Each structure stands twice: as structure tokens, then as C-alpha cells.
Image (cartoon, rainbow, N blue to C red):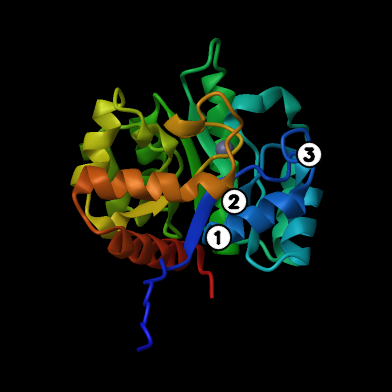
Amino acid sequence: MDKLITKKKLPSLVDTHCHLDIERYFPDFEVTLDRSRIAGVTDLVIAGVDRDGWQRIVELSRRYVGVHAAPGMHPMYLENHRPGDLETLAQLVQTENVVALGEVGLDYHIDNADRSAQQKLFEAQIDLAAASHLPLLLHVRKAHDQVLATLRRKRFAEGGIVHAFNGSHQQALQFVNLGFVIGICGTITYDRARKIRRVAAELPLESLVLETDAPDIPPASHWREWNSPEYLPEILEALATIRSENVFDIAGQTTINARRVLGLG
Ligand SMILES: [Zn+2]
């Protein structure tokens, strides 16, 4: 008698934040992309750092199905940004298929942060995202309240993702109220990350998306290696364990959330 073996397939996953464009870490883009697809990651968003990376990001998004571009000016690398970059970015988002501006925000964690320069850069990119009807990939460290206040003052309505979220439950809910979702990364695979694990456990599933931030923030099982989008299922499994929920439900809902906020078809 024939045996019918039915293996339930995981819904496709979206890595909402990675840096797969950086050739130093990913010398063979296609190999990493193939491995990620085999692991179930059908879509990934490449976040920008500075102008030098934008062209490659948009080229990769043009060439490969499921690869999406989010160019922007990172608040940690102020010294890389030059006058005129904002105009270049504005042109790029008009002519290319860009899904978000990223990564942008405020980082008060770095030494000698030039807060007023960061603020200026952030606000200029909020204005550009608003004018272009694009969501934001937010980079926020030790400045959640300031970012929230800025988004409110600007009445920013396009939403986006708070990447590698590391704030409090209350702050997460405020972002959600402004139309953002919360990016859950490999940090939750570490037992010691109690605070963020609790936040990830308690927020409504409709407000969460998954990300690797590869090559940064490797999950616990790869802590000595560079991270890769192919490890995204490990973050999914950790989230399912923390929430005592089904892996399939979390995969399905986080993918719906990512597609909604990024406007992916
Ligand atoms: Zn990043």
C-alpha cells in the first residue's frame, strides 16, 4: 500500500534587513541568495549605508527576483555623507524600484555622536520618504523617544520597520501606533537577551517582522561567524519558542506584515 507522506511546507520568509551588497562579506552573492532561498527566504531587503553602496543595491534588486532595495544614509557614518547626496538619493528613489529608505534614524550609543547633525540628516530623509510615499527602515539606539517625537512632529504617515529593535515594550507600542512594525533579529536567540525576548514575546504578532542584519548580529548557533539571510529560520524558531506559538503561524503572519509595510506584491 502506498504511503502518503505529507510534509507541511513553511510559508515563505522575508528578511527585512540585511547588507548582502557588501562584497567583502558576501563575495559570491548568488551562492548566498540560493542558500537563502533553499532555507525558505524568498524575499530580502538590502538596506543602504552611504552613497557608495546605492548603485550596487539597486542593480541587485533589478537583477534578482525577491531582492529589494532600501538605499539611505546611516546615522552612524556621518563622515561618509557629502553635500549633494540627498539630491542623488531623491533621484534614485524616483527612477529605481525602491521599497523603502534605509537605514536612517538616530544613534546616541556611539561615542561623540553629533546629535544635531544626525537629527538634520534624519529629518531630511523623513521629508524625502514622505514626498516619495516610501516607508523607513529605522536604525535607533538609545534615542527611541527622540525618534518617536521627530516622527510625530513631522506627521510621518508612511510607516516602516524599526530595525533590530532594542527599546522597551511601551516604546514599541508607540512605534506601532505610528504605523511601524518591529524588526526581530538574532539577538533573541541569546538566553541573556532577557529584555528584548520579553518584548518579542508580548507584542501582538501583527506588529512583528523578521530580519538578520547580515553580516551583523549572527544568531547564537553561528556566533563566531558572519551572519547570513540563510539563518533567518533560526530567528523564526526562537521567536516561536519564546512566544509558545506555532512556527507556521509566525512565519505566515510575519511575512504578511513585511509585505504590507513594504508594499511588496
Ligand atoms: Zn543594518
Is residue 95 shown left or right of residue 36?
right
Is label 2 in a helix, a strand or a loop?
strand
Q: Earlier in the sequence, mark 2 or mark 3?
A: 3
Whether residue 151 appears in this view of the structure is yes
Residue 172: which quarter of the image? top left
Is residue 182 shown left or right of residue 31?
left
Q: What residue is pinned by disc 1?
A: 134
**Dot 3 crowding, Cα within 10 Å, few <14, some 14–19, many 20+:** few
Whether residue 57 appears in this view of the structure is no
Please determine whether, in this image, residue 25 is positioned above or below residue 137. above
Q: Which mark is residue 101?
A: 2
Mark 1 or mark 3, whichever is nearer to me: 3
Q: What residue is pinned by disc 3?
A: 23
Circle 1: residue type: Leu
Q: Residue furthest top?
A: 112
Is label 1 in a helix, a strand or a loop?
loop
- Which residue occupies the foreground of this view, 3 or 226? 3
Residue placed at 50% from the left, 59% from the top?
Answer: 14
The x, y position of residue 82, in whole percent, is: 78, 32
Residue placed at 27% from the left, 42% from the top?
Answer: 200
Residue 9: which quarter of the image? bottom left
Assess whether mark 3 and mark 1 are in contact (beta carbons under 8 angstroms).
no
The x, y position of residue 36, in whole percent, is: 60, 54
> Does any atom of ligand 1 lie closer than 8 Å to the CB of label 2?
no
Label 2 vs label 3: CA separation? 21 Å
Circle 2: residue type: Leu
Is label 3 in a helix, a strand or a loop?
loop
